[in-house]
Image (tube, helix red, strand yellow):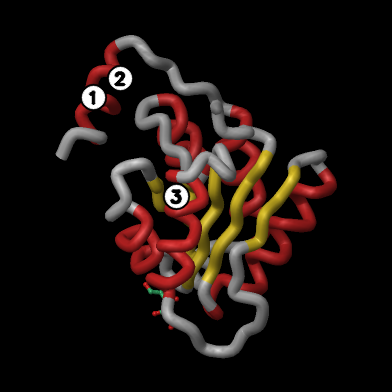
Amino acid sequence: MAADNKMIALAADHGGFELKNRVAEFLQAEGYKTQDLGTYSDERVDYPDYGYALSQAIADGKAGRGIAICGSGIGISIALNRNPAVRAALCHDVTSARLARGHNDANVLVLGARLIGFEVALECVKIFLNTQFEGGRHAERVKKLGKC
Ligand code: RB5
């Protein structure tokens, strides 16, 4: 069964908690369904737990796309990309968010909440969710990513 691209799984550690809530509000206002995998407060937690929860949701087809957030975006990216079903792209500008979809067929957008403002973060989300994979010469490369 194809994953539902209108279902967006969200995950963050304490560093990304506040931005995750803003992203969730934005997505719901735009008509997306969201699945919030935590964390649910700003109490200190470990980003791998949330990265792994999100990668499992993608691997299981429970969500077609994901948005993951930690303080820098780095730790949770590393956790996510350990799962071969995931192509997580850390983006802090709209060009990266567009290329992550167009060239890399990224299925998870990662944001670093301590490095990016709300406005730019929401622009990245918008572009990420509205850009199609270009296929063509990129398709073979993306296929190889699943073969390590
Ligand atoms: C938490 O303090 C911080 O280390 C985490 O959010 C993230 O930036 C790790 O890469």
Q: Is mark 3 within 8 Å of ligand 1?
A: no
- Which residue is painted at 52% across and 40% down in the image? 61
Q: CA distance from mark 1 to mark 3?
A: 20 Å
| 133 to 98, vertically: above or below | above
For residue 121, which quarter of the picture?
bottom right
Q: Secondary structure at mark 3?
A: loop
- Which residue is painted at 56% across and 71% down in the image? 16
- Which residue is painted at 32% across and 50% down in the image? 83
Quarter of the displayed picture in which ligand 1 can be seen: bottom left
Name the front one of labels 1 and 3: 1
Which three-letter amino acid code belongs to the residue tagged 1?
Arg
Judging by the rendered image, the residue that carries numbered circle 3 is 91
Q: Which mark is residue 141?
A: 1
Q: Residue furthest bottom?
A: 43
Q: Do residues under tags 1 and 2 come within 8 Å of each other at their CB atoms? A: yes
Which three-letter amino acid code belongs to the residue tagged 2?
His
Residue 137 placement (x, y as % from top left): 28, 13
Q: Nearer the viewer, residue 124 or 101?
A: 101
